[in-house]
Image: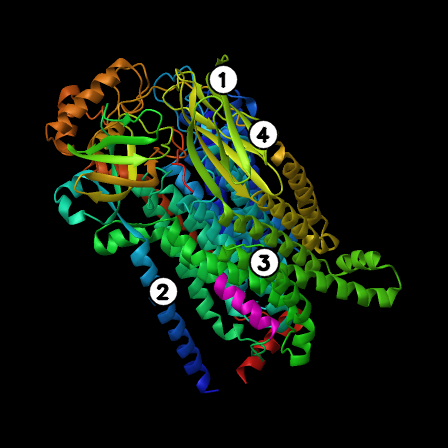
Amino acid sequence: MPSLGTFLLLTTFVVCSYAVAASIAGARRRSQRLIESGIGAFYLVAALMTVASAVIVHAFVTDNYAIRYVQRYSDSAQPLAYKIASYWGGLDGSIMFWVFLLSVFGATAVKVNREKHRELIPWVVAVIAATEMFFIFLMVVHNNPFSTFLTPPPADGRGLNPLLQNFYMAIHPPSLYVGFVAMTVPFAFGIAALATGQVDDSWLRAVRSWTMIGWLFLSFGLTLGMLWAYEELGWGGFWGWDPVENAGLLPWFTATAFLHSVMVQERRGMLRVWNVTLVIVTFFLTIFGTFMTRSGVVQSVHAFGEDRELALLFTIFMAVILSVSFGLLIYRLPLLRARHELDSWISREAAFLANNWILLFSAFFVLFATMFPTLSEALRGERLTVGPTFFNTWMLPIGLILLLLTGIGPLLAWRKSTLSNLVQQFLWPSTAAAITAVALLVFGVRVWSSGVCFAFSAFVFGTITQEFIRGARVRQGATGTGLLTAMIGLVARSKRRYGGYIVHVGIVLMFLGFAGQGFQQEETVVLKPAQQVTVGHFTIRHDSLSVTSDSQKQMITGQVTLFEDGQPLGALEPAKWFFNKHEQDPTTEVAIRRSGAEDVYVVLAGYEVASQSATYKITINPLVNWIWIGFGVMAIGTGIAMLPEVAFSFAMARIPSTATTSLLVLLLLLPAGLRAQHSENPQEVLVAPKSALEREMQKEIICMCGTCGRKRIGECTCALAARMREEVSRLVAGGKSREEIYQYYIEKYGSQEPLASPINKGFNRLAWLFPYLIGASGAVAIAFVAVRWSHRDEQRRPAAPVSPAGNPELQARLDDELRDLD
Amino acid sequence: MKAKPIKIAATAAVFVVAFGGLLYSTLREGTEYYKHVDEVMIDPAAWHGKRLQLHGYVVDDSIFVKPSTLEYRFQIQSNGKVVPAQYKGVVPDTFKNGSEVVLKGRLGPDGFAVEPNGVMAKCPSKYEAGPAARAPKS
């Protein structure tokens, strides 16, 4: 099976490179046959990746521990769902899953747009296939999920990390990947438009719905990540500006900006360079985010492993993306001239422009702050870090301005708003905001940021309500139906506009949830039985501490009674679970009492069985549930906005409508409080290495017991490995350098066998270089073939230029270009 | 028309200067040095009063908790250099003998004063084994 998998990957790589070469050559020669064969190869890639995915899922389900990756992330005790989810649980598999999704998305995008955008398609195929090639190359040379043990494999796997064995975690990464991958399609169309010079608005129409799908899944993934952090990690919050979280947020900002600025181009023919740039930057940020989290460039509390080789490969790929796409953009600048100029700063396009600048600024700010430790280390040699406070200082005002713009934008007219127009439009929303602000002051709300947020939210609600009512009134006058019927008719007629407004309602609800954090109350107390503590208007009484156990774990549970204003509300059971064989790493089971107004969030932070006393960390999180509800509203709005595409093509119809339905079903499931379903996984607790060198050495030296299958001594659990670890520790403590330790082992065992990888020196370098040489020569070969094939065509009919006369489309383009010459 | 590029350049310059200034001033308050224990202990006095993120390993059997309170005293070390630390609050599950930690706080003459919620136990990786623990924080 594993060799079948590796073979499939290699085949996919070859087919992929053929797709790139055939498409580019076909596009340049205008050979329909080459283009068709390129598309055929492109579909074949999707089919091959599907088979390869089936192979690895089969390996997981049948517990095939001969494959390292399966052994590493699964075990026989794991429930079936998590065995399948383990596919994307690790680095190698997540890259493969990425390619699989990309190939399926790419094939769908090509199939849907094949007839409508004939000229663009070969370039779209080439760009997506080239991206796939990069990731397949990564797998083949560096992270092959199908690599096997050279010696008899272990009897059981090591299991997926218990914290990842969780409902949200199983669907959170795929959702983010779908969002990331969907952003490749707009990028491919953008590059195709630049390459062919067909930079009119038609490529935007092909791209819009894909960006919306990507955006929706990105939002969904981010929301799930927040939910997971909130319910599982037990620190009371949901967003900590961790690099891994930021990586997903960066493309979200630029995709949001693109979805808005697209409207300006459609309506006014402005911002054309800007839109292409946003598409490129969004794609770049998805790749950069992957790079940032996979290569260990940025240190994070839950950092991924450091991997310089991977970092180098990614850096090369990113440099290629940037130079090719911006090179093309500069080359095509003359074609991208705006059809109109900005007439007035008090216009809707100006509001969109402001929104775009702020979103882009947010992206670059978050990028800067996330990379700050790395940057400072590179520039000053000293590692400086910035904490969540720094992010909040900046992102709070930025978020508020964006919220306000959400309300202002729809009130302004295109081109130019007149004064009377402004008064008429702003009257009611401003009144709503003012009333809210006064009411807040009267009721004594003194948290300024949250207060401003509430007032702005009222403003946006006012705007949206006014838009709906005015639109419905006009329609009512025209059709003579009731107000409600008119409103439904209104949404049905211009779905994008009113769907967008509904998305804005969702955003406002999320902001209410964020603003609630300003009123968060927190208390940490040690309580003896029958003692109680009051936080806000809640009282928590500690009744007793219970120690129970089942087949999997031992559970220490705090029995707590919750009172609101003296009235008993019910019992809560925060707990610590000690899984068998994991006694050193207890998991925290948070008890949450949810309600629309606020969550009571109780964590059992410590306990003393003898005195039955317990330490509780109690957090009151006002309005936090509105974040999740807000996302639901946003999903509904996006679904409505995407509906028009249904009329255009049946294939698109399936994606958005089923996606929305399943999202809604998922959403209904979320608050049901799905607890983490842990399962035990056998793992030895290892002695922590005392220095960096020792830690590295534990990865570089292989256990020589001969039974455990060439595991690194840092991972192997046999007795010899323990002795070898001590030996390494002694050598390091004795001041031996890396080279001397290598030498020691080479002499002791008479060969380089105990080394995990060949020494990067002399003849051994060939072993390192070999895969790269093959990859590089492949790239050269593709370029050669592509150029050669395109030339062959020219040679064959040198004196017969393509006559535009027979082709009206070509004629129109020629006329267009000739006009530009004047 | 001629004035347009100048206008754009001037606006851009104003924005860049304004944001640069704001960024610089907030950065000065927001940054913390990220250091290992042994790097700091070469010259402890130089670091007194500065905001630090201190990286090290908890010294075995050095953790003491005052009964029925949340006051912790413990020591962290790296490469043989040891610093005593004081902390009041909740520690993450993975905080124990020998664990790799990052402490936020300030160094003083009598040891490292950890700020509230300033104990972060490092976990190897989200994708590698070991739980992604995070210190409880507000």
Is B85 placed left or right of A550 in the picture? left
**Which residue type does callout 4 highlight?**
Leu
- State yes or no: discs 4 and 2 in contact (Cβ < 8 Å): no
Q: Which marked residue is nearer to the observer: mark 4 or mark 1?
A: 4
Report if residue A189 is visible in the image: no
Chain letter for the residue marked with disc 1 in the picture: A
Mark 1 or mark 3: name the one nearer the start of the chain: 1
Q: Which marked residue is nearer to the observer: mark 1 or mark 2?
A: 2
The residue lying at 84 percent from left, 64 percent from top is A476
Q: Which residues are magenta?
A: A347-359
Magenta region's main secondary structure?
helix
The residues bearing labels 4 and 3 have C-alpha atoms spaced at a distance of 40 Å
Q: Are marks 4 and 2 on the same chain?
A: no
Chain letter for the residue marked with disc 3 in the picture: A
Mark 4 or mark 1: name the one nearer the start of the chain: 1
**Which residue type does callout 3 highlight?**
Val
Q: Which residue is mark 1?
A: A77
Q: Which residue is mark 3?
A: A442
Q: Which marked residue is nearer to the observer: mark 4 or mark 2?
A: 2
The residues bearing labels 2 and 3 have C-alpha atoms spaced at a distance of 33 Å
Q: Which residue is mark 4?
A: A674
The residues bearing labels 1 and 3 have C-alpha atoms spaced at a distance of 59 Å
Q: Which residue is mark 2?
A: B22
The residue lying at 65 percent from left, 75 percent from top is A422
Q: Which marked residue is nearer to the observer: mark 2 or mark 3?
A: 3
Looking at the picture, does residue A820 appear above or below residue A776?
below
The color scheme shown is rainbow
